[in-house]
């Protein structure tokens, strides 16, 4: 069975800090889980974020970016930016996290794990 892609712009898996303001209540800090030039997804426990809610969103040290909630489900929210992110800004965010291996690797391309791993942590 083949799944249909519904997004016009693919998103990149990412973990960056964000903060949003809706004009109601205090600003809320979030972790942005995926990002594209057209929008993003983040976790939240705030019940006031429903489809159609307008917000200002800060991504890392960038913003405010005006956005509209497109969907909310199971503690996650997806938003669309009113003005797409600049490609240079988006590329900068992409380089600040662990790369999405699924995008660059196919099954069978991973090296075998060594039997003994070093006993140090970074």
Image: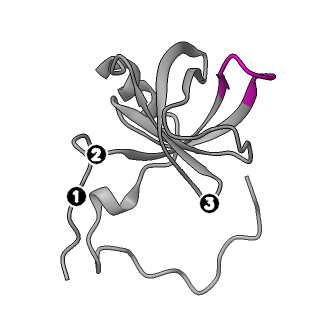
Q: Residues within 10 Å of mark 3 (few under 14, many from 20)?
A: few
Tell me if 39 is positioned left or right of 7 in this view: right
65 vs 108: above or below? above
Kindly indicate the quadrant of the structure image that contains residue 110.
bottom left
Q: What element carries label 2?
A: loop
Q: What element carries label 1?
A: loop
Mark earlier in primary sequence (2, 3): 2
75 vs 88: above or below? below
Magenta segment, which residues? 19-28
What is the distance, in whole Å, between disc 2 and disc 3 at their CAs?
A: 22 Å
Disc 2 vs disc 3: which is toward the camera? 3
The reply to whether dot 2 and dot 1 touch (C-beta < 8 Å) is yes
- The residue drawn where x is 67% and y is 26% is 19
Residue 24 included in the magenta stretch of the image: yes
What is the distance, in whole Å, between disc 1 and disc 3 at their CAs?
A: 21 Å
Residue 106, x across and y down, in percent: 26, 71
Check disc 2 and report the residue beneath it.
10
Kindly indicate the quadrant of the structure image that contains residue 4.
bottom left
Check disc 3 and report the residue beneath it.
74
Residue 23 included in the magenta stretch of the image: yes
Mark earlier in primary sequence (1, 3): 1
Q: Is mark 3 on a helix, strand or loop?
A: loop
74 vs 59: above or below? below
What is the distance, in whole Å, between disc 2 and disc 1 at their CAs?
A: 9 Å
Check disc 1 and report the residue beneath it.
5
Residue 18, x across and y down, in percent: 63, 29
Nearer to the camera, 120 or 58: 58
């Amino acid at each position: 069975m083949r799944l249909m892609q519904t997004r016009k712009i693919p998103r990149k898996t990412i973990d960056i800090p964000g903060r949003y303001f809706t004009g109601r209540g205090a600003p809320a800090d979030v972790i942005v889980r995926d990002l594209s030039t057209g929008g993003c997804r983040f976790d939240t426990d705030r019940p006031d974020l429903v489809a159609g809610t307008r917000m200002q969103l800060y991504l890392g040290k960038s913003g405010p970016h005006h956005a509209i909630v497109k969907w909310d489900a199971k503690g996650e929210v997806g938003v669309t930016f009113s003005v797409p992110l600049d490609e240079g800004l988006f590329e900068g965010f992409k380089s600040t996290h662990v790369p999405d291996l699924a995008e660059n690797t196919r099954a069978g391309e991973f090296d075998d794990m060594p039997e003994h791993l070093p006993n140090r942590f970074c």
